[in-house]
Amino acid sequence: MYFLTFISRLFQYTIVIYIIKILFNNNFIFPQKPQFILHMQKGTRKSPFLHVA
């Protein structure tokens, strides 16, 4: 039983890492994402989602 829980937990971590990799790769595909991050770093009071849309 312990081995099964270990496998399932490992599987969950693999899925999370896979999703993070996909999100990280999308930052290079879509040029709007880094601008969104820049606006967040500037700390603008306006809604940052307006720049993404």
Image: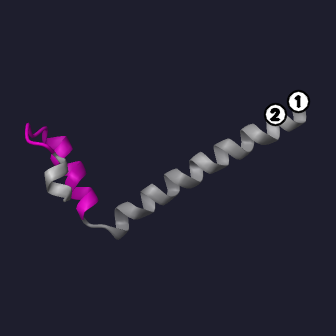
Q: Residues within 10 Å of mark 2 (few under 14, many from 20)?
A: few
Going by the image, does 31 lie left or right of 51?
right
Q: Which residue is rendered at x = 77% and y = 40% of the image?
A: 8
Q: Quadrant of residue 4?
A: top right
| Secondary element type, mark 1 | helix
Residue 20 location in percent, x, y? Answer: 50, 51
Q: Are marks 1 and 2 in contact (CB under 8 Å)?
A: yes
Q: Which residue is rendered at x = 44% and y = 63% of the image?
A: 25
Of the residues shown, which amino acid type is indicated by label 2? Thr
Quadrant housing the C terminus: bottom left
Q: Is residue 45 magenta?
A: yes
- Point out the stretch of residues depicted in magenta: 32-47
Q: Residues within 10 Å of mark 1 (few under 14, many from 20)?
A: few
Q: Which residue is rendered at x = 66% and y = 49% of the image?
A: 14
* As drawn, 8 above or below 52: above
Q: Is residue 3 magenta?
A: no
Quadrant housing the N terminus: top right
| Secondary element type, mark 2 | helix
Q: Which residue is mark 1?
A: 2
Residue 16 location in percent, x, y? Answer: 58, 46
Viewer-side residue, 14 vs 53: 53
Going by the image, does 14 lie left or right of 39?
right
Number of callouts in the render?
Answer: 2
Q: Which residue is mark 2?
A: 5
Residue 6 location in percent, x, y? Answer: 81, 36
Task: Estimate the spatial distance between the alpha carbons at disc 1 and disc 2, rounded to whole Å.
Answer: 5 Å
